[in-house]
Image (spheres, rainbow, N blue to C red):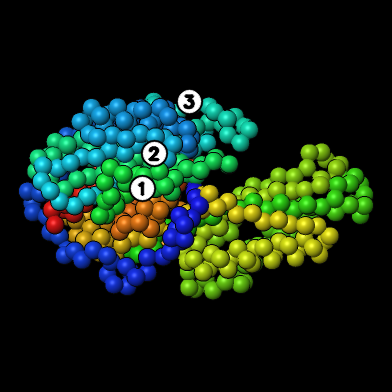
Amino acid sequence: MHRSPLKNKTFRPVIKSLLTGGALALAAPMLAHADVASVDAAAKAVEPHVIEWRRHLHANPELSNREVKTAEFIAKRLKAMGLEVRTGVGLTGVTALLKGGKPGRTVGLRADMDALPVTEQTDVPFKSKVITEFRGEKVGVMHACGHDAHVAILLGVAEALVKMKESLEGQVLFVFQPAEEGPPEGERGGALLMLEQGVFDLAKPDAMFGLHVMASLNSGVIGYKPGPLMAGSDAFSLVVTGSQTHGSRPWAGVDPITVSGQIISGLQTIVSRQLDITHLPAVITVGAIKGGIRFNIIPDSVEMVGTIRTFDRDMREDIIKRMQTTASKIAEASGAKAELKMRSEVAVPPVINDAALTDRALPLFEQLVGKDKVQLIGLQTVADDFSQFGTQIPSLYFWVGITPPDKDASAVPFNHSPLFYLDESGMLTGVRAMLSLTTDFLSQ
């Protein structure tokens, strides 16, 4: 996951909104029984299509910035609904506008489209058998994070809203976003590129809603959190350069593998010993290391790649500076050099939920699924570039459970696992929640 700063706004926290109660002064809603019943009926009516669409997408996954057939599939169905559709936004992104029968505000709804380089190990009849190349290696491709469900849910919401078009106040912008998992190295993509390429040209929303299916919650459960929810994400590469020599004569060169090991240990002390983690958590992870080609040759260089997760701009900048100092000084002590590079094109700010939108959504969620199935979740160190939209307009992001009710959601494989399993009944909760949020916001 994922992008570069949008001028200087990308990592600007929405602190003012959090302190003042949000940019939108909205009274807490209370749906009438008839309204809940109409939402349920509308969601149930589109559920067969949602399941059908999800299964097709699951069997035909595409990696980030390669969602060509996925985009065609989406656009075809949106056009069949009679919507104004725009394609090619952010390379493969799709947007569509539904104009209601009455004037009013605009709601934006977003779903991400891309799959992961994961070989599926589930035993569903529509499991992915797609193989492709990723970073020079043959890999399987799988919707191991549930983006297939996100697309299907949003298509279902679009179909339901089209049927109530004449009574709808305002308009709805549907945003199908590519490359949420991050564009390939050397490319740009995702929410930031969509913003730069006019994702809001059809209409700029007054508020933006998004959801994510989560294996850590049971089906029928909604997870929410006001304020900071998901971490900002940065990707880095760290190249350690030594001096190649024979493996039997390490003193004749400088071993970058040994130095790299020392640097990895040193990086971990930044979080464990140098930051005040009682303020906010942070993570530094080295995810891959590559160096050398033969058992008896000490190589010239080693490359490490990894991620940083933070919830605060100042802490993020402090960590990067400390990483540069730690790596360069450890390398210097052994006669090596270390060069840290941040991949600004995939940097993502934290997801920060607008306080007013969250306050208004909570009673809606409770009416839809019951208070016992609406769970306040803690800070999450995973990231999502939905946050880029939140730098432009008030936004709300929430989680939807998709682990069968008879299973322990804390013990099942998490998102991104080759064993990731989605209980399709959970998607109905996503459709119902999105419909309720949209119609409620537009009715105010």
Q: What residue type is labelled 3?
A: Lys
237 and 431: which is toward the camera: 237
Which one is closest to the eye, mark 1 or mark 3?
1
Q: How many discs appear?
A: 3
Label 3 packing within 10 angstroms: few (<14), some (14-19), many (20+) = some
Nearest to N terminus: mark 1 or mark 3: 3
Residue at image position (86%, 47%) is 244
Which one is closest to the eye, mark 2 or mark 1?
2
Query: Circle 1 is placed at which residue position?
Result: 212
Check residue 89 in the rendering and tell me which mark sits there, or answer none.
2
Q: Is residue 304 visible?
A: yes
Label 1 packing within 10 angstroms: few (<14), some (14-19), many (20+) = many
72 and 359: which is toward the camera: 72
Q: Is residue 425 visible?
A: no
Q: Is mark 1 on a helix, strand or loop?
A: strand
Q: Position of residue 175 (x, y in %)?
A: 32, 42
